[in-house]
Amino acid sequence: DDGRLQSRIADPRFKMAKTYLVQVEGEPDEAALEALRTGVRLKDGMTLPAEAERIERLRRSVLDHFRGHGFEFVMPPMLEYLESLLTGAGQDLKLRTFKVADQLSGRTMGVRADITTQAARIDAHLLNHRGVTRLCYCDSVLHTLPATISASREPLQIGAELYGHAGIAADLAVIRLMASAFMRIGVPVSRIDLGHVGIFRALAEAAGLPQESEEAVLNL
């Protein structure tokens, strides 16, 4: 027994996450379960709401919204051979990808850091649909370094992709879908960031930027 360790774990000053196992008599009704989900008042204050339950409820709501707009749900693998996983990926994604050695083949494998490229390969090589393809997904990704100081290295990524339509109507449809998804789960949207390389190319062309300067700016 380590008394100092136990004291540190139990002391609320250190704010260490703890999981409690509770034995109850009988079967709790829905009101009691909802109270546990939203938080229970103890001597030292309210307990935190059930985070996993809340995340799952939001995840299900957003995915149902995507499905209602014709997007098919896909589940790409967490682990792939590195040359496949990083096909068409930028340098930033390569740096964020965990690499491991496959003990069977000796080849290098990667734990996905982004699902977007995986969804694109599913559309291009597995489905091979004619016309427009709509895919959606939601799963964990793993980053070698967190995006910010407070960010997790294992964030949950949810998204929707539209393939087979090169016009601006497709871009508008996806942006509207994203905005309506936020409205559905009650999250106000004050700003939408667009990271489309086509926007950059159009601005560079309008500014008359030389090819070598365009690549230098793009790689910043």
Image: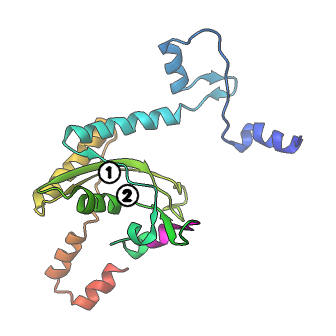
Q: Residue furthest front?
A: 104
Residue 193 vs residue 77, the one in the foreground: 77
Badge 1 vs badge 2, beta-carbon distance below 8 Å: yes
> Which x, y percent locates residue 57?
40, 33
Among numbered discs 1 and 2, the one appearing first in the sequence = 2
Q: Residue furthest top?
A: 26
Residue picked out by circle 2: 115
User: Compared with residue 175, is residue 99 higher up or lower down, i.e. above or below?
Assistant: below
Element marked by disc 1: strand
Q: What amino acid is labelled 2 in the image?
A: Ile
Residue at figure coordinates x 67%, y 27% from the top left: 21
> Which x, y percent locates residue 68?
21, 37
Question: Distance from label 1 to label 2 (Cα)?
Answer: 8 Å
* 215 horizontally vs 33: left or right: left
**Residue 42 image-quadrant placement:** top right
Q: What amino acid is labelled 1 in the image?
A: Gly
Residue picked out by circle 1: 159
Residue at figure coordinates x 29%, y 65% from the top left: 195
- Magenta-highlighted residues: 94-103
Residue 51 vs residue 23, the one in the foreground: 23
Q: Is residue 141 magenta?
A: no
Residue at figure coordinates x 68%, y 42% from the top left: 15
User: Compared with residue 210, is residue 191 higher up or lower down, i.e. above or below?
Assistant: above
Residue at figure coordinates x 53%, y 57% from the top left: 153
Residue 5 vs residue 11, the one in the foreground: 5
Element marked by disc 2: loop
* 100 horizontally vs 121: left or right: right
**Residue 119 image-quadrant placement:** bottom left
